[in-house]
């Protein structure tokens, strides 16, 4: 019985390791879809991890800024979440790979609670996904 127990523990450890790794996809559509899906998962729980944390507000409706700049600002805002870093690391990794910049300007003048920031980010990435799907279909 001991070998079965060891095998079961090894399998559980492997599954935990795989589940804890950041999202590693290559397609922008898949990355956007995963970001949106993870936000929905967080929002469907009892409470968003570190929901009372304040982050810099990203004005996703600002038409003067490119989508890449807004993605960069979102990633920068999420990097400031230190208490629940593990929960938000997959978002940061995908956002950084989507915008491809090393840094961007983000004002800390206006802040927003994380519980309000995530739905805004989800709406933005969902809109980007739809635009990519529409342009690919044409």
Image (cartoon, rainbow, N blue to C red):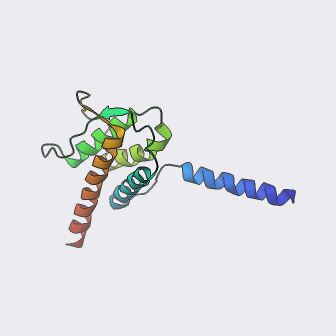
In the depicted structure, whether residue 133 falls above or below residue 49: below
Q: Quadrant of residue 65?
A: top left
Residue 50 falls in which quadrant of the image? Answer: top left
Q: Residue at x 28, y 39 (%)?
A: 73
Residue sitting at the far left:
64
Residue 107 position within the rendered picture, expressed as x and y whole percent measured from the top left: 23, 29
Residue 111 x %, y %: 27, 32
Q: Above or below — where is 78 with respect to 34?
A: above
Pick the front one: 78 or 104: 78
* Residue 112: x %, y % from top left: 29, 35
Q: What residue is shown at x 62% (from left), y 51% (from top)? A: 16
Residue 20 shown left or right of residue 39 in the figure = right
Residue at image point 36% right, 59% down: 33
On the image, the x and y values in percent for residue 54 come to 34, 32
**Quadrant showing the N terminus:** bottom right
Q: Nearer the viewer, residue 126 or 114?
A: 114
Q: Judge left or right: residue 16 versus residue 27.
A: right
User: Farthest residue in the top direction?
Assistant: 109
Residue at the extreme bottom of the image, as rendered: 138
In the rendered image, the residue lying farthest to the front is: 46
- Tell me the quadrant of the picture where the C terminus can be found: bottom left
| Number of on-image labels | 0
């Amino acid at each position: 019985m001991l070998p079965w127990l060891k095998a079961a523990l090894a399998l559980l450890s492997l599954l935990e390791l795989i589940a804890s790794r950041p999202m590693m996809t290559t397609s922008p559509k898949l990355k956007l879809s995963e970001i949106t899906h993870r936000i929905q998962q967080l929002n469907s729980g009892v409470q968003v991890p570190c929901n009372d944390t304040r982050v810099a507000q990203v004005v996703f409706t600002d038409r003067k800024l490119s989508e890449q700049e807004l993605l960069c600002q979102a990633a920068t805002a999420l990097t400031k979440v230190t208490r629940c870093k593990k929960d938000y690391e997959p978002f940061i990794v995908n956002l950084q790979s989507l915008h491809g910049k090393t840094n961007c300007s983000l004002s800390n003048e206006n802040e927003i609670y994380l519980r309000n920031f995530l739905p805004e980010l989800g709406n933005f990435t969902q809109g980007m996904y739809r635009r990519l799907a529409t342009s690919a279909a044409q």
